[in-house]
Amino acid sequence: MKWSTIQLQKYRGKNIELDEMIDVSAELMKRDSQVRDVSPIHVTGIANITTEKVTFHLHIHGKLILPCARTLKDVPFPIDIESTEIFLLKPEQTFEDDEAEVHRPIGEMIDLNPIITELLLLEIPMQVFSEEAKDDSDLPSGNDWEVVVENQDKPNDGKDTKKIDPRLAGLAKFFDKEES
């Protein structure tokens, strides 16, 4: 998805329909080691071209394969992104909208592949869980430790029992002596 600015100026005042399958798997897997595989990414949308700028209204969808945070098994993670990317064609030009993402052509070329790669990297969550890991209530545990899921603490049946580490039991007596 690469165009020269001269090539795009031929379509000034018109819209260009975008509908392409791109392969960004090598770049994505190189930049994030958690990504195990990437399906071909389907990019659709419209490019509006004026003398000052090119505005791309993109819809990006595909699938990433990421590791499960508990089991490390492959988990398909669907991607569905809507984005508007603006390329300013004149070097001295500024753009006033703080919300918009503004880019400049590199040389005389507009390349959407690095931008699409960045958008995909931003969509990768910190953790994904496979369906079996979500349904599995048997979490790992060991000698004096266990994994506890946030907001799912074990009920204590109204009993607030605080276990005191036997190594620190002498400190509890220290405060009792000081009060009397």
Image (cartoon, helix red, strand yellow):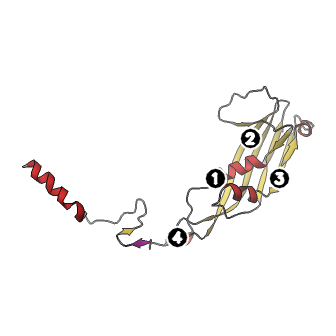
Mark 3 vs 1, N-terminal side:
3
- Rounded to the nearest angstrom, the CA distance separating label 4 from label 2 is 37 Å
Q: Mark 4 and 2 residues: CB-CB less than 8 Å, in contact? A: no
- Rounded to the nearest angstrom, the CA distance separating label 4 from label 1 is 21 Å
Kind of residue at badge 4: Ala
Q: Mark 3 and 1 residues: CB-CB less than 8 Å, in contact? A: no
In front: 19, or 77?
77
- Rounded to the nearest angstrom, the CA distance separating label 3 from label 1 is 21 Å
Kind of residue at badge 2: Glu
The secondary element bearing badge 3 is classed as strand
Mark 4 vs 1, N-terminal side:
1
Look at mark 2 in the image and give the residue it sits on: 85
Look at mark 4 in the image and give the residue it sits on: 133
Q: Mark 4 and 1 residues: CB-CB less than 8 Å, in contact? A: no
Look at mark 1 in the image and give the residue it sits on: 123
Give the image location of residue 81, x and y in percent: 68, 51
Residue at the image position 68 percent from the left and 54 percent from the top: 31
Q: Is residue 118 above or below residue 73?
A: above
Kind of residue at badge 3: Asp
Look at mark 3 in the image and give the residue it sits on: 19
- Rounded to the nearest angstrom, the CA distance separating label 1 from label 2 is 16 Å
The secondary element bearing badge 4 is classed as helix
Q: Mark 1 and 2 residues: CB-CB less than 8 Å, in contact? A: no
Circle 3 or circle 1, nearest the eye:
1
Q: Residues within 10 Å of mark 1 (few under 14, many from 20)?
A: few
Count numbered badges in the picture. Answer: 4
In front: 125, or 27?
27
Q: Residues within 10 Å of mark 2 (few under 14, many from 20)?
A: some
